Image (tube, rainbow, N blue to C red):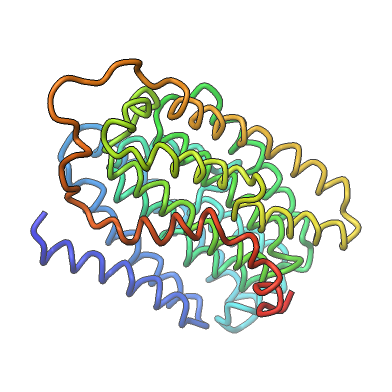
Amino acid sequence: MAPPIYSALIISLGLGTTMTFASTHWYLAWMGIEINTLAIIPLMAQNHIPRAIEATTKYFFVQATASATLLFAGISNAFLTGQWDITYTPYTLTSTLITLALAMKIGLAPLHSWMPEVMQGLNLPTGLILSTWQKLAPLYLIYQIQPNNPNIFIALGLLSIIVGGWGGFNQVQLRKILAYSSIAHLGWMILILSFSPPLALLTIIIYILMTFSLFSSFMLTRTTHINSLSTTWAKIPILTVSTPLILLSLGGLPPLTGFMPKWMILQELAKQSLCPLATMAALSSLFSLYFYLRLSYAMTLTMPPNNPAGTLPWRLNPRHNTLPLALTTTSTICLLPMTPAIMSLMPF
């Protein structure tokens, strides 16, 4: 893809999300999400291979269905209330339709089945955009509507945590595993959104840091299959140490950064007298932890016993800029001691 076209598409992605963030009108917010969708479709199909075209087609149909449902719900809400204000959705039917349409857009369970198949057909940079940037605008709208009954958020969040962990079992394609990881983390965000929006924002920020670190590590080694992880030591040896730590941070193990949002979410649920829900969420996260440990095992304990012939790739200069990876990896691993400072800065 030509650099000017690529730059225009990236700018359009930023413009669509910014338009949604700045909107108080349903039609303008819907328009921003549509700009996002139309901008990422050429990025998905840029490889001109059957799997990428199939993934792009699936993504287009799913997003078109969700957009039509969202527009219908917004028009119905305007017809019933007489105004297009995003924050004013007093009717249960329209707020539920809007929530389900936005859940389909970001891939929350049970509307998640398109996400792993689409991710499998994309290259890693486009998959990173789909897993992080494309979630922001719909999550912002979900935060804005805030239905009076939080049970739908609890159901969607808990089901996403379970499905995101269960679906990653026996997967060998890293992009599918990352898709199920995204579903599980979105479940944590939605679960706490109606009780503590600042905590949901913190969870989103830490999830983006961890996901960017992991995708960048795989892009640096050009790894897309679990069997390829065992040769990482011959390409960039330091990633043999850092990538398992990123995976364990995604799993939420202390003393890594990923433990912070899960710990605080469980604490908040306990404060809301929802101890059974907190227990179910914590136990369900063990499913996700299993496949993170499986990937860490594949990277560190299944290395070939002999050195490959010829010049080792790690002796050559990497073609990618590794500074963003170094910064985000450090944040992914070392931010847990800053929890008290973060809690003092955010109005929990």
Quadrant holding the N terminus: bottom left
Residue under the image location 43 percent in, 34 percent down: 176
Please state which of residues 228 and 178 is positioned toward the viewer in this rendering. Answer: 228
- The picture places residue 182, in percent across and down from the top left corner, at 51, 46
Q: Would residue 68 be seen by someone viewing this image from the given angle?
A: no
Q: Is residue 230 left or right of residue 343?
A: left
Please state which of residues 109 and 283 is positioned toward the viewer in this rendering. Answer: 283
- The picture places residue 305, in percent across and down from the top left corner, at 35, 15
Q: Is residue 230 left or right of residue 74?
A: left
Q: How many marks?
A: 0
Residue under the image location 51 percent in, 63 percent down: 138
- The picture places residue 10, in percent across and down from the top left corner, at 25, 65
Residue 38, image quadrant: bottom left
Identify whether 173 is placed above or below 124. Answer: above
Identify whether 111 is placed above or below 74. Answer: above
Quadrant holding the C terminus: bottom right
Residue 99, image quadrant: bottom right
- The picture places residue 39, in percent across and down from the top left corner, at 27, 61
Residue under the image location 64 percent in, 71 percent down: 145
Q: Residue furthest left?
A: 2
Residue 163, image quadrant: top right
Q: Residue furthest right?
A: 273
Q: Would residue 22 be seen by someone viewing this image from the given angle?
A: yes
Residue under the image location 65 percent in, 42 percent down: 161
Identify whether 113 is placed above or below 8. Answer: above
